Amino acid sequence: MEKGIPMYSPLGHSPTRAPASNTSRSINSLKTIVKALALGLPLYALYGWHTNQALLPSSLSRRGADVNATSQCEQTPLLQPSRNDTLDKAFSFLSTEKFLNESVSRLSGAVRVKTVSYDDLGAVGEDPRWDVFYDFASYLEKSYPLIHSKLQLEKINTHGLLYTWEGSDKNLKPTLFMAHQDVVPVPEDTVPAWTHPPWAGEYDGTYIWGRGATDCKHQMLAAMEAVETLLASGWEPKRTVLLSFGFDEECSGREGAGHLSKFIEDRYGKDSVAVIIDEGGGFEKTWGSLFAKPAAAEKGAADVYITVRMPGGHSSIPSDHTSIGVMSELITAIEAQQYRTHLEDENPYMSQLQCGAAHSPDFPPKLRELLDRRQHATTKTSKANTKPDQLALEAARVGGPPTKYVMQTSQAVDVIAGGAKANSLPERVQVTINHRINIGETPQTVHDRLTEIAAPIAKKHNLTLHAFEPQDESSSDTTPLEPANSIILTQTPHIIDVAPISPADPKSPSGAHTPFSVLAGTTRALYGEDVIVTPSIMTANTDTRYYWNLTRHIFRWGPGYDEQDGPGLGNIHTVNERVSVKKHVHAVRWFYMFLRNMDELEVEVEV
Ligand SMILES: *[C@@H]1O[C@H](CO)[C@@H](O)[C@H](O)[C@H]1NC(C)=O
Ligand SMILES: *[C@@H]1O[C@H](CO)[C@@H](O)[C@H](O)[C@H]1NC(C)=O
Ligand SMILES: *[C@@H]1O[C@H](CO)[C@@H](O)[C@H](O)[C@H]1NC(C)=O
Ligand SMILES: *[C@@H]1O[C@H](CO)[C@@H](O)[C@H](O)[C@H]1NC(C)=O
Ligand SMILES: *[C@@H]1O[C@H](CO)[C@@H](O)[C@H](O)[C@H]1NC(C)=O
Ligand SMILES: [Zn+2]
């Protein structure tokens, strides 16, 4: 999982193509609504509690004063695959110590292959640092013999791995599991801080320790364990199963996911996949409940450079403000004002609030009151509505920064460079600001605000403001000359729109299952019906950003949970990364059940 840690921020790469707008999807959604109205279906059957209401005319998007909180968080019943002695026996085997030992040894071995990706990697096939992925592919081949003898494996852009398990019914869209093979580096000076060495894959009876143990080899191998087990038991899918593993997620995903998604789109077409599961959301204990939180959305991102150019000279005769002083003024002004905390109706966090209100014993009364007020409000909360969003503000106050930033565009000045010598005036200073964009806003929102802040400061210091001027593509190999006496705002190649929101309805208009309901019902069948499944939103980005064309049903979801370990990310991207082996085995069981459920149930895949 890319966490936006500045050290690994994917600067200096060529542009990530921002996928096409949502317009055609909105049109499709509207078509569905029109169809549903023609059939006399109630609208909430279509959109349920997951509130795609921004798409609906406001008079249709409300059910008025009779809002029933429980029905706003309808939970899918437990979905157990049908009984079958062979398959049930294979499933039980996944709970044995024998299987645990075997899967520990395979995951430990995977951690020992140092599949590090670096920000400054050269071309695939040229930079020898990519070669370790050959070793990793051989390791997988040795560890999963059935997958490698019975499935088709295609290597995409050398190290991307695409496994195809052909289903017998070509009318069913494939299920696709993603993960990435690469891991972030371990800085040399942090090695002594590790309890167990970062590349040994040691097992202490509870955890496997090491870089990549959680992010993302656990997810990848859990899916492979499930497929290998199904192959061993003679199961044959009706619905094609795809495994698609990139190899540079931690430094942009362009070479891996970028190529894999194109290849899959060329083969199967747009909207051709039933559901995608990739790393992401997990479990959370809050308000006295255990929530399972597959992410149905992902915030956008924009890294922006601010450059101040001012005359140099001897520092014995300075101007009142050097370029560093002016930059300080800019940063102070930027930090003096936060983006607004704002919860759009379609933000999946709204679903969690509704689920909390419906099911959680300790749901805060004040939040409940504000939520009720919002649901009964006659005026729709809209992007144009600039009144303070009391519900969002209260939720952020209660939940702190992790909650605030699912409802607010973040800004962080992460890099600064400027000045050369104690007796020379600094001619150039530059900062990088990282933004994660809230639902309801766009990279343009960020550009507009920075321009607004910079304009008066430029004027005050008699500098020219160059705000997000289009760059001359033709002269791309020579750095364009920066104008003197200026403040320059530049969008870096790191720009990502807010992801389309995956539908999270408990059932389809016709009463069939949806990809989300199969996910939810599988999860509750595995962990019990006290688990409340609610869609969530990620503040970081995953490789799924390259897969938007393939399906609307993308869930970033780590299905493993270990009650003793509790929720948590297992120290990803830092010292002592580790994964609970119980969690890993549970994830295998989840993938196993999910594949069987996707095959047996009638699943309607809304386009
Ligand atoms: C609210 O909805 C739930 C689920 O649809 C239903 O079981 C319950 O009876 C409803 N409660 C009221 C007061 O209508
Ligand atoms: C599993 O491994 C442990 C040592 O890690 C060993 O004591 C135990 O006997 C093994 N169990 C099985 C069933 O192989
Ligand atoms: C159980 O599943 C296996 C593997 O898919 C299959 O070969 C077998 O026919 C099934 N048994 C029954 C009784 O359906
Ligand atoms: C502002 O800058 C321009 C050229 O960059 C210069 O001609 C002008 O004299 C400056 N004005 C002041 C008040 O310094
Ligand atoms: C998605 O489809 C659009 C339109 O065909 C295309 O321009 C774009 O490159 C595709 N996106 C990705 C990530 O492949
Ligand atoms: Zn990851």
Image: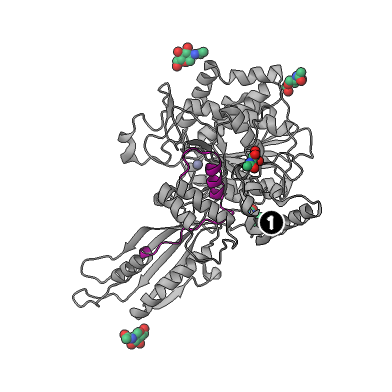
Q: Is mark 1 within 8 Å of ligand 5?
A: no
Specify the amino acid type for callout 1. Answer: Arg
Asked if residue 350 is among those painted magenta in the image, a careful observer would answer: yes
Q: Circle 1 sits in a helix, a strand or a loop, which is it?
A: helix
Residue 367 picture location, percent across and down: 48, 49
Give the labeled residue for mark 1: 25
Task: Answer left or right for 192 relative to 586.
Answer: left
Q: Which quadrant of the frame does ligand 5 lie within?
A: bottom right
Please, is residue 295 above or below residue 315 in the view? above
In front of the other: 229 or 197: 229
Name of the residue lying farthest toward the left: 316
Residue at 38% across, 65% down: 334
View extreme (front): residue: 65
Q: Magenta segment range?
A: 335-364
Does the magenta-highlighted stretch encompass residue 99? no
The answer to whether residue 61 is visible is yes
- Tally the numbered discs: 1
Query: Nearest the camera: 257 or 328?
Result: 328
